[in-house]
Image: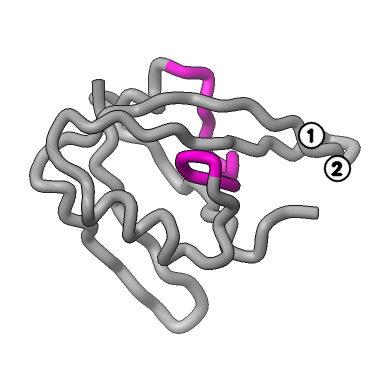
Amino acid sequence: NLPAGSVIIDSISASSDLNNQNVKSGDMILAVNGQDLESYETLLDVVENGKIGDTIKLKIGRVDADYNVTTFEVEVKLISDATVTSEQNSETQSYNFPFNR
C-alpha cells in the first residue's frame, strides 16, 4: 500500500537534517507536505519551487524484517539553491535533494 512514486533513500549526507532524525538509508519518502507521491516528480516540484530555509514535511516509511511498514514524519529545511541533481543508469534514477537544518 505504498504510493506509486515512493522515493528510496540511498544515502544521507552528514550535514543533512535527515541525518539527525532517525532516517536511514533504505527508508522511503512516501509523501511531501501531506501529498502522497504519485511520482517522484511530486517531491521534485516541491524542492525545485522551494526557497533556501523553507521547511517541508516528509512522510517516511521503513520496512522491517517481517515486511511491515512503519511510517513517521520529519521536517527538513532546504539548503543551497534547491537545485536537484540527477544521476541515471539503465535501471535506476537517483537524485540529490538539498535538505538541511
Q: Quadrant of the C terminus?
A: top left
- Which residue is farthest right? 66
Tell me residue 23's x, y (percent).
51, 27
Magenta residues (range) = 21-34
Q: Secondary structure at mark 1?
A: loop
- Looking at the rendered structure, which numbered label has been put on residue 92? none
Residue at mark 1:
64
Specify the color scheme: one colour
Q: Position of residue 86 (x, y in %)?
A: 27, 66
Whole-Å distance between the Cαs marked 2 and 1?
5 Å
**Badges 2 and 1: C-beta atoms under 8 Å apart?**
yes
Residue reaching furthest to the left: 81
Specify whether 96 is left or right of 28.
Answer: left
Magenta region includes residue 24: yes
Could you tell me the amino acid type at mark 2?
A: Tyr
Packing grade of label 2 (10 A; few <14, some 14-19, many >=20) is: few
Question: Label 2: which residue?
Answer: 67
Q: Amino acid at mark 1?
A: Asp
Horizontal side, residue 35 vs residue 87: left or right = right
Specify whether 47 is left or right of 9. left
